[in-house]
């Protein structure tokens, strides 16, 4: 299920420990049940959006949302430490995929699937302006979510700075970067892929050690985010041996 509707159902989702990615509340709703749900949302760090009633009506599949709709994760999130532990237990240098605002769930699922096949130890996504682990992502990953842990973080730049202390180097995809074949991309590495439209954000790009471009020979100048991720992942695989 992607969404839960109704006050009691949403509150029960929080109390049962389900991961609520996003919460949509009818604007100007401040009665007791809504305040209770908002308290649970604050404790869980859920992103909350206040919308007009007609917008909630459009989103609702039941017609009985009672002023609240929750988008829930179809899979449990891992932690960044879980991913690092997985790398240590494999005896390999960490190979991480970091996604800076991937919004299309089909792209996210495809990237997770390729990350699994490329032997990445985990995927890190952002909490804001990005797709969570919805049912669409699960389908697009074709089962890869059973094997690749996905962590969600609030601040990707801060997460990268912590990971640098673990000896991890970062390369991001950028059309103005060096040719990927000319970069040394083995060892402990994190590949950063940016938003479908805007690419990697400036602050995240500045935290990267390298920027890599994919050679283009056709008449258009960019690749789909999941395709670009796959091309760069397999150059890393090639160099890691």
Image (tube, rainbow, N blue to C red):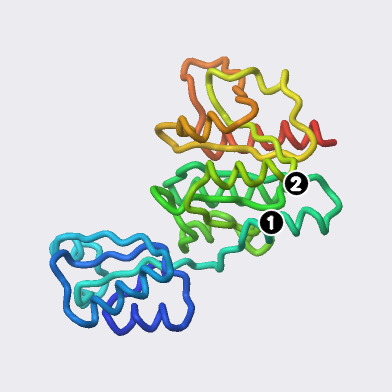
Q: Position of residue 79 (x, y in %)?
A: 61, 61
The structure residue drawn at horizontal position 53% and vertical position 16%, both measured from the top left corner, is: 218
In percent of width and height, residue 47 lies at 36, 60
Q: Alpha-carbon distance for marks 2 and 1?
A: 9 Å
For the C terminus, give its image quadrant.
top right
From the viewer's perspective, tell me whether residue 109 is left or right of residue 12.
Answer: right
Q: Is residue 146 above or below residue 107?
A: below
Q: Looking at this view, is 108 or 206 the one in front?
A: 206
Q: Which numbered tag is attached to residue 100?
A: none
Discs 2, 1 touching: Cβ within 8 Å? yes
Q: Position of residue 153 (x, y in %)?
A: 52, 54
Helix, strand or loop at label 1? It is helix
Q: Residue at 58% of width from left, 44% of height from top?
A: 98
For residue 83, the mark is 1
Figure quadrant of the N terminus: bottom left
Drawn side of residue 115 relative to residue 206, left or right: right
Above-or-below relation of 125 to 207: below
**Crowding near the residue tagged with mark 1, few <14, some 14–19, many ≥20 C-alpha atoms within 10 Å:** many
Say whether residue 191 is left or right of residue 72.
Answer: right
The mark tally for this picture is: 2
Label 2, on which residue?
A: 94
Q: Residue at x 65, y 32 (%)?
A: 232
Residue at 29% over, 79% down: 36
Few, some or many C-alpha atoms within 10 Å of disc 2 (few <14, some 14-19, many ≥20)? Answer: many
Which of the 4 image quadrants contains residue 215? top right
Query: Which is more N-terminal, label 1 or label 2?
Result: 1
Q: Secondary structure at mark 2?
A: loop
Q: Position of residue 181 (x, y in %)?
A: 72, 21
The one nearer the camera, 24 or 232, is 24
């Amino acid at each position: 299920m992607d969404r839960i509707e109704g006050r009691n159902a949403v509150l029960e989702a929080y109390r049962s420990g389900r991961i609520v990615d996003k919460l949509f509340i009818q604007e100007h709703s401040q009665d007791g049940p809504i305040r209770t749900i908002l308290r649970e949302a604050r404790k869980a760090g859920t992103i909350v959006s206040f919308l007009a009633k007609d917008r909630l009506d459009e989103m609702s599949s039941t017609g009985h949302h009672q002023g609240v709709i929750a988008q829930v994760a179809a899979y449990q999130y891992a932690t960044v430490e879980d991913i690092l532990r997985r790398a240590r237990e494999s005896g390999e240098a960490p190979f991480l995929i970091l996604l800076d605002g991937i919004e299309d769930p089909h792209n996210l699922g495809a990237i997770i699937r390729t990350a699994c096949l490329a032997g990445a130890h985990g995927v890190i996504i952002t909490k804001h302006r990005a797709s969570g682990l919805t049912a669409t992502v699960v389908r697009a990953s074709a089962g890869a979510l059973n094997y690749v842990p996905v962590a969600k973080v609030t601040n990707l730049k801060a997460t990268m700075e912590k990971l640098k202390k673990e000896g991890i180097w970062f390369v991001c995809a950028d059309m103005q970067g060096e040719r990927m074949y000319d970069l040394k991309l083995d060892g402990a590495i994190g590949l950063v892929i940016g938003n479908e439209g805007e690419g990697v954000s400036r602050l995240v790009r500045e935290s990267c050690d390298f920027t890599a471009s994919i050679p283009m020979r056709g008449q258009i100048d960019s690749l789909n985010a999941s395709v670009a991720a796959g091309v760069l992942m397999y150059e890393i695989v090639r160099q890691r041996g």
